[in-house]
Image (spheres, grey):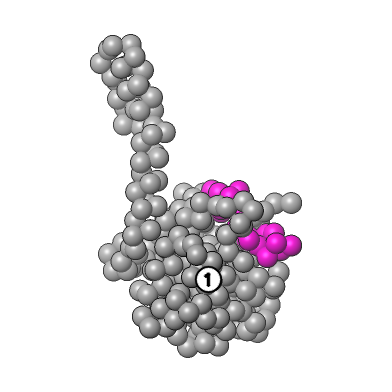
Amino acid sequence: MELVTVTDEGPIRIVALNNPAKGNAISKPMAEQVQRLMQDFERREDLRVAIITATGTRAFTFGADVADPPELWRAIPTVGFKPLKPVICAVEGWCVGGGIVLAMMCDLMVCGAGTKFYYPEAKLGLTGGMIAGLVSRIPHKVAMEIMLLCRTVDAARAERIGLVNEVVPEGQALDTARQWATELCGMAPMVLSEIKRMVTEEIIPRGPSEQMAIHGQRMSAIRASSDFAEGKAAFREKRPPRFEGR
């Protein structure tokens, strides 16, 4: 079974978490697959809008898979992948822990009427910290209530506080997301990209965990570079290095 499915419907890419037997809990390979598929979406000129969703209506995701903990940042928009094209999240059922982080970092979100958001890390004694960005996306006191008191937020309240754009009948979140994506495909791509760039890079602040993940990626890229391999070889061979910037 594919842990993540991908469907390209013309210019629309649909990426779905696909392990409903485990509540679509995000495992290490699942996070890596989401990252690869969305990085491919970034590069493809024929793709204009992405939808991130999940299989089934029981859960969008129960969060990180404790049996196979992921590097969750890989699956997070603006961190593990950075498309300047619109990304919509279509949520049904439970959206727990890191699932809230994934969903809140998308540009738009639609959820089914049975959706519930729950962030339990204060009860578990562990946090990745990226949830702190919630305070820049919904009212401060409400975000603190979700994070500190671990309150469950139903779909109706999620819409009232601005966590989601729209609540639709259960099972219709993906169809609504498709309609929005079709509308976005008729908009000017350069304008959408510039608006998104200004919002994500210049207006919404990056939390410490988000910055740390981005910095870690940059350092990993240097460690994996041809220049680093050349530098080590030149040192061993006692010769000047021939760097190529890659």
Query: How far across and how far down the image is residue 227, in percent?
Result: 34, 27
Tell me which amino acid carries mark 1.
Answer: Lys
Residue 12 in sight from this viewpoint: no
Q: Which of 237 and 40 is in front in this view?
A: 237
Question: Per the image, is 123 magenta?
Answer: no
Query: How far across and how far down the image is residue 197, in percent?
Result: 33, 62
Q: What stretch is highlighted in magenta?
A: 16-36
Query: How far across and how far down the image is residue 137, in percent?
Result: 39, 75
For residue 171, what is the image quadrant? bottom right
Question: Per the image, is 35 magenta?
Answer: yes
Q: Nearer the viewer, residue 14 or 61?
A: 61
Badge 1: few (under 14), some or many (20 or more) residues near its Cα, within 10 Å? few
Q: Residue at x 30, y 17 (%)?
A: 235
Q: Which residue is drawn at 52% across and 81% down?
A: 151
For residue 128, what is the image quadrant? bottom left
239 on left or right of 119: left
Tell me: residue 154, above or below residue 203. Answer: below
Residue 239 in sight from this viewpoint: yes
Q: Residue at x 33, y 63 (%)?
A: 206
List the residue tagged with mark 1: 123
Tell me: residue 88, above or below residue 32. Answer: below
Query: How far across and how far down the image is residue 236, in percent?
Result: 34, 14
6 on left or right of 224: right
Q: Which residue is drawn at 55% across and 49% down?
A: 32
166 on left or right of 129: right
Residue that sits furthest to the left in the current view: 240
Tell me: residue 174, above or below residue 224. Answer: below
Q: Quadrant of the C terminus?
A: top left
Tell me: residue 72, above or below residue 144. Answer: above
